[in-house]
Amino acid sequence: MSLISINEVSHNFGGHDIFENISFSLEHNSRIGLIGLNGSGKTTLFNILTGRMVPHTGTVQRARNLRIAYLSQEVELNEQQTLEECVSGAHEEFNLLHKNLEAARQAVAARPDESNMKKLQSLEENFFQAGGYHFAAEMKIVLAGLGFPLDSWQRKITDFSGGEKTRIQFARILLSPNDLFLLDEPTNHLDFAMIYWLESYLVKQDKPYLIISHDRHFLDKTVNKIAEIKNRRIFLTHGNYSIWEADRETRSLTQERSYKRQQKFIKKTEDFIAKNMAGQKVQQAKSRQRTLAKLEIIDKPEHEKMIKLSFGAPKRSGNDVVIFENAKLGYPGNILAHKVNLHLGYRNIVALVGANGSGKTTLLKCLRNELKPLAGKVKMGASLNIGYYDQMHTELNEDINVYETMQNLMPGATQGEILSWLARFSFTGDDISKLVKVLSGGEKARLYLARLIRQQPNFLILDEPTNHLDINTIEQLELALENYQGTVIFVSHDSYFIRRIAQRIWLIKDKTIKEIDADIEEIFNDSLSNQKAKKKQEFPEPRDLKKRINPQILEQMMTEINVLHQKIADIESEISDIESKYGEEKYYSSRESMLNLKAEHLELENKKSFLVRELEQKETAYLEKCEE
């Protein structure tokens, strides 16, 4: 039985059709990437699958007691909890068991009598049998993979940034007890190392998932089927994104030819029926009429409206656009990079990459003259007209509408000229009167591009330009940048985008910024970070991560970790038992008995210390093995 199946579902908003009679199912082995233009209904489909939204027509069936882990774009966390409390609370059963266990340990410490000791031993056994120690190790793996070291676990949620809160919510989703993952843009706010870790983690899970993503490299690595929402219908293609892309034109041509061939057959058949229903061939006419009635009609191919992006021909800048001379970048007391010596020339396209917090935004601020270097020089070239794409879209006035946004940038332009320009970016009809504050992330991104391109800059500084854009728009942006007659420096975590347009890569790492000659995956994938030689490939084939790591090895390692946890718990019980004996007369009244008791106590403490060190080594080895 399918986990979820929808049959002949149709849905609309305000008279605008989103879906028309779509059927779709999620099976126990589904690993599907969901793609489509912004506004095509991807998030709506997620809401229908989860039951948050009821379709206007059609049926939705879910397996009994199905547990869905849904990562949405909205963060909902208890701001007063610590990181550890928040994430461990994702699994209520283990969280409750752990709280009871801690309470029992405190009770034994306060009064180590036989009743408390038996209760503690029982709870230890329950926690072990339920997989509590495994969950604790898994939580450490997930939080480490998403960039949260142990020393951050006791910080309150309110102290984390917006991007960090999104990752915390993601950790809760990954650790929650579930039968199915529904992930909406899971790579948002992740740096390269986190994205590559997530690829590996998902592929190793023995669970199905449906992923909305515009990250084509991520889709290549994690899915074996693509579901495309197009023209109110849903189309399935076996294979990853690259296979879907390679077959895109063939599918379109096949549908068009099939449609024309069927229409020709229908017309010919209808003509035959019309001529012969009253003649001698009436039986043949009726037979053909029945054939037409049973015919499954092929939809007429509809070509979706595509944004066509072009930066035009800007005024030429000088040959030297930016020169860094022994520059020290950062803030007093927080140096992000020193001894920076780099050159950016006319029509260069440079990708600026690095881990979250490494200093990418700081460098962009220096290029925009918002921040001066602490030492050295940052020389800007002559005749520069800088265009800045801010991923947070802070330069948009939230309190005016789309039309007014462009009108302010086009003084003297006629209404027709403004409407024509907005239409190039798919703003038509009622869209132009929408306030900026109510626009979706994708709409704001398109409006920002409309402003940026209109300014005709000759030096583009782009901060995560592909965020919130659908794949088709990203492809158009790539084409526009390839034909751009200016200079570009951009920050992005989209491997596909970087490989497509970047001529050079600047890496921020260990407080330095250097130009490198290596593949993005080679730089950031943890399994390749130990300076191991690896043949560089422009577009590496998707790896079968399940074959690379034998799950039996991981299971054996986790069993050993659980055994060590149990041994430590047993020793702690013995230590508590000995500590309770110090108050007994037969021990404190006899020097020999007391010395023997202390020797036994010391031996147990030493054994515990040895096991704790061994446990730490095995947990570290487990984490490293999981990320190979």
Image (cartoon, helix red, strand yellow):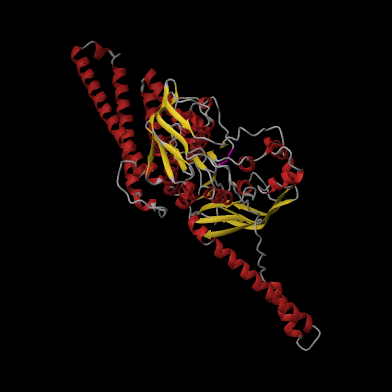
Q: Position of residue 321 (x, y in %)?
A: 48, 37
Seen at 29% across and 17% down, the residue is: 581
The residue under the point 23% across, 21% down is 602
Residue 98 is situated, as x and y percent measured from the top left of the image, at: 44, 30
- Magenta-drawn stretch contains 432: no
Q: Is residue 598 above or below residue 83?
A: above
Rendered location of residue 31, percent (x, y): 50, 53
- Residues in magenta, as a range: 69-73
Look at the picture and state if 73 lies above or below 306: above
Quadrant housing residue 152: top left
Q: Nearer the viewer, residue 464 or 614?
A: 464
Check if residue 72 falls in the magenta segment.
yes
Name of the residue lying farthest toward the top: 589
Magenta stretch prevailing secondary structure: strand
Residue 621 in sight: yes
The C terminus: image quadrant: top left
Q: Is residue 298 above or below residue 103?
A: below
Q: Quadrant of the N terminus?
A: bottom right
